[in-house]
Amino acid sequence: MSDLAGRKALVTGGASGIGAACVRELAARGAEVTVADIDGVAAKALAHEIGGHAWSVDLLEVDALTELRLATDILVNNAGVQSVSPIEDFAPDRFRTMQTLMVEAPFLLIRAALPHMYAQGFGRIVNISSVHGIRASPFKVAYVTAKHGLEGLSKVTALEGGPHGVTSNCVSPGYVRTPLVDKQIADQAAAHGIPAQEVLEKVLLTESAIKRLIEPHEVAALVGWLVSETAGMVTGSSYVMDGGWSAR
């Protein structure tokens, strides 16, 4: 496919997991992709693989983003982290940090990209949210709060960007097979003394009708469609990919 030929794309958290899958998907569709990641070495390696560019960036340094201007046609806000703790024990600094990374930084990147997108009458913004952007789980107060905020940011961007040919949507997956989740499964299996598959079915995927992890390339395929010309009337939406979790 070459439907994105001539388009420039930027993917944050692009050096691994969902981000890396999105980078490869967009590059395969013909886009010139910049891999933005705090891990500069991994970003350069992936950029070399796909013939793109690397941007070593710490998105928590928001002051450096306030005057930024991005000449990108496609922006995928993917960078994120997780922390698990009861509210009464949740460190306030950690809570603020997660809001900065997953709400403020996407806002600043969108703000930096919109002038270019408006000028050319085309733009595609995809925010990688989560089923936790529309549902809640205990002990994930900062993550759930941030993802709900990201969903709101995405919708406001859609309303403002629509008259200028800019779309904004969220992709909201359940548990995706990434190194972080694989480690969580192994740790849970060891802690409970049960097989990994049982951890999947009885711990992580209790609410899901389909008892398997989502593969990163499945998320990336949806992102690839959302940034295409054929998705020009799709905006302000949240595409849930959760195996039926949110159907309950």
Image (cartoon, rainbow, N blue to C red):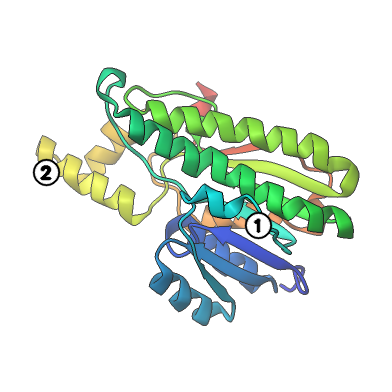
Q: Amino acid at mark 2?
A: Ala
Seen from the viewer's position, the closer of residues 33 and 137 is: 33
The number of callouts visible is 2
Q: Is residue 67 above or below residue 188?
A: below
Q: Is residue 222 above or below residue 57?
A: above
Q: How many angstroms separate mark 1 from mark 2 (CA)?
A: 45 Å
Residue at screen point 66% across, 58% down: 224
Contact between marks 1 and 2 (CB within 8 A): the answer is no
Which structural element holds mark 2? helix
Which structural element holds mark 1? loop
Whichever of labels 1 and 2 marks the residue nearer the N terminus, that label is: 1
Seen from the viewer's position, the closer of residues 147 and 106 is: 106
Residue 121 is left or right of residue 127, and the answer is right
Residue at screen point 58% across, 36% down: 150
The quarter of the displayed image where residue 116 is located: bottom right
List x then y, in percent, for residue 22: 56, 61
Residue at screen point 17% across, 45% down: 187
Question: Alpha-carbon neighbours of circle 1 within 10 Å: few (<14), some, or many (≥20)?
Answer: few
Give the label on residue 39, or none: none
Judge whether residue 195 can be spotted in this image: no
- Residue at numbered disc 2: 190
List x then y, in percent, for residue 85: 27, 28
List x then y, in percent, for residue 49: 50, 80
- Residue at numbered disc 1: 68
Q: Amino acid at mark 1?
A: Leu
Seen from the viewer's position, the closer of residues 14 and 206 is: 14
List x then y, in percent, for residue 36: 52, 63
